[in-house]
């Protein structure tokens, strides 16, 4: 059972929740940029939430199914067309042999996720199917998909997958998941942050600008990092900073004063001053920004960030329970 890649689009890779436990050896985490959408897509087809899914970026990806299957499309609205008709999203879909799925253009957000019942038949590397592009490991032969590739699927087909398939054979799903409490799309976004380890080393004007001025995402934005353009941020006094650990959402300020936010394929350490850290609950929203989107950073406390993560965790749990009830 395979999917034939007719066109890879801007970038499409296999990603799961990431490769943890190896950063001390210089191996990055990788994983889905928008983990909420990836997990929900897997739940919709009856997979576990850490099964590998196809992360499609912006536009152009075209796939042909060479066997019947159950898929779910979540995340960004990339104008998905199934056999020339608008494809349902945020719900399970039965696709027939020969069907063609295309992503024409990014209307809302920048990354969509395609999960397929039974998962993609690729080996785990260090406990993950995620693609680490620079090292060439994980995913489909350690790289982005290319024209002519054939992606095998279904090796982990389970009773839950079968239950979803049996339902769809009777009638298509007429329901969809509401995601708006955990994920936001739009060209104007509020991204919440906590103070970074060097926050107090920036001058007072810069600390004020960070949370009171707007910053624009440039076209220099990929899975490793997002570069923003806006009012310059400066240190009170120059100092030597040893490289130290960084994580997804770390806001670094290089010598030009323009923020860089580290993303899923970030390096394991960094030497630029860290003025802030994006809260975990807002990382999927950050990941879905399109170039030229405007962001305002809002500083909150560590306690508030923790409460927001707990709130999102509970909502995701409720979404999962709701999906399972629909699949019975």
Image (tube, rainbow, N blue to C red):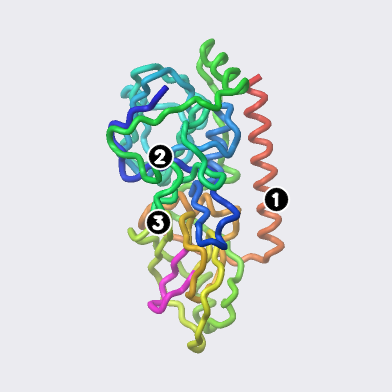
Q: Nearer the viewer's eye, disc 2 or disc 1?
A: 2
Q: Position of residue 323 (x, y in %)?
A: 62, 28
Q: Disc 3 designates what residue?
A: 293
Horizontal placement of 79 versus 42: left or right? left
First-in-chain label (3 vs 1)? 3
SS category of the residue bearing label 2: loop
Q: Secondary structure at mark 1?
A: helix
Q: Please provide percent x and percent y for residue 286.
A: 49, 54
Q: Depth check: give the residue in front, 78 or 249.
A: 249
| Magenta segment boundaries in residue numbering | 252-261
Give the image quarter of residue 146.
top left
Q: Is residue 253 magenta?
A: yes
Residue under circle 1?
A: 310
Quarter residue 42 falls in: top right
Dot 3 falls on a residue whose secondary structure is loop
Cα–Cα span, label 3 and label 2: 31 Å
| Dot label at residue 322 | none
Q: Nearer the viewer, residue 246 or 2?
A: 2
Crowd rating for badge 1 (residues with CA inside 10 Å; few <14, some 14–19, many 20+): few
């Amino acid at each position: 059972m395979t999917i034939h890649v007719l066109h890879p689009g801007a970038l499409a890779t296999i990603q799961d929740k990431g490769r943890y436990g190896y950063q001390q050896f210089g191996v990055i985490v990788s994983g889905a940029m928008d983990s909420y959408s990836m997990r929900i897509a897997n739940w919709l087809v009856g997979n576990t939430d850490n099964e590998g899914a196809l992360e499609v970026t912006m536009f152009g990806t075209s796939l042909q199914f060479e066997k019947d299957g159950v898929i779910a499309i979540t995340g960004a609205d990339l104008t998905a067309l199934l056999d020339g008709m608008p494809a349902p999203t945020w719900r399970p879909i039965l696709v027939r042999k020969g069907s063609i799925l295309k992503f024409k253009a990014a209307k809302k957000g920048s990354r969509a996720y395609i999960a397929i019942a039974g998962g993609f038949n690729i080996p785990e590397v260090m406990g993950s199917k995620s693609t680490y592009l620079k090292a060439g490991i994980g995913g489909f032969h350690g790289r982005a998909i290319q024209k002519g590739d054939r992606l095998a699927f279904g090796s982990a087909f389970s009773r839950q997958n079968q239950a979803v398939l049996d339902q769809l054979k009777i009638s298509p799903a007429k329901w969809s998941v509401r995601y708006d409490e955990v994920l936001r799309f739009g060209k104007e976004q509020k991204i919440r942050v906590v103070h970074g380890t060097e926050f107090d080393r920036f001058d007072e004007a810069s600390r004020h600008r960070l949370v009171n001025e707007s910053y624009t995402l440039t076209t220099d934005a990929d899975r490793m990092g997002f570069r923003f353009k806006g009012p310059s941020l400066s240190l009170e006094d120059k100092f030597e900073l040893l490289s130290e650990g960084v994580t997804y959402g770390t806001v670094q300020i290089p010598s030009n004063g323009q923020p860089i936010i580290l993303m899923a394929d970030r390096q394991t350490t960094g030497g630029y001053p860290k003025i802030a850290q994006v809260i975990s609950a807002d990382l999927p929203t950050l990941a879905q920004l399109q170039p030229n989107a405007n962001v305002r950073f809002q500083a909150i406390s560590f306690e508030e960030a923790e409460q927001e993560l707990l709130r999102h965790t509970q909502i995701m749990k409720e979404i999962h329970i709701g999906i399972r009830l629909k699949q019975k």
